[in-house]
Amino acid sequence: MAVRNPEDLFVTLLSDVRQNTERSAKLYQEISQAAQEPDIKEALESRAWIAEKDLNAIDRCFQLIEEKPVKLSGRLQEVFVEDFRRELAEIQNPVAKHLFILAKASHLTHLRIAEFEALVATADLTGHYAVGVLLESCLADKLVFVERTRRLIREHVEEKIIDRLAA
């Protein structure tokens, strides 16, 4: 799709975010299957559920602007998934594996945050304020997940340090 004006850019960015949100839901589900620690597994499963909720909000955005998503060829997440699978398979230590899973989940979420920040600004630029509200609620979900993941990493590391010191 040729981008001729801010409105075209908005539809393109919104389509990209929709496609990436759909992929993210599947990826978080896959990552959660690799996690063996219950807290990490549940957090990732919750993230997948929230991604599905965000997908509904994005679909509502398309309804509000009376547009349909355009097909894009974005390969960034596909490469991310391929690298994740390959690198995870090489990690033998369970503690290192869980830290890797959390780090990659955080990395993916930061990418999504950047997408939504740009999209919210573009919604404002094009006068789609109601859509901006929906998108900011999706952005807030991602910001919360980053903080929760940071805490999980810190708690996981502290627990392992305490175990090591007690031994």
Image (tube, rainbow, N blue to C red):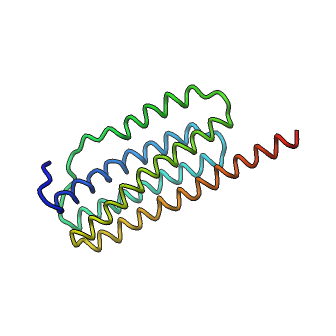
Say which quarter of the image contains residue 123.
bottom left
Q: Is residue 23 left or right of residue 68?
A: right
Q: Count of labels shown?
A: 0
Coordinates of residue 115 in the picture (x, y in percent): 36, 55
* Image point (29%, 64%), residue name: 60
| Residue drawn at 82 percent across, 43 percent down | 163
On screen, residue 29 above or below 84: below
* Quadrant location of the C terminus in the rendered image: top right
Towards the viewer: 140 or 32: 140
Above or below, 89 relative to 54: above
The percent coordinates of residue 3 (x first, y second) are 15, 53
72, above or below 14, in the image: above
Q: Is residue 162 left or right of residue 136?
A: right
Q: Is residue 6 left or right of residue 76?
A: left
Q: Closer to the camera, 67 or 91? A: 91
Which residue is painted at 49% across and 61% down in the image? 143
Near-viewer residue (92 or 6): 6
Q: Residue at x 47, y 54 (%)?
A: 49
Q: Residue furthest right?
A: 167
Quarter assignment of residue 62: bottom left
Q: Position of residue 80 (x, y in %)?
A: 42, 37
In depth, the one of 121 and 102 nearer the eye is: 121
In this picture, residue 81 sits left or right of residue 90: left
Q: Position of residue 18 (x, y in %)?
A: 31, 53
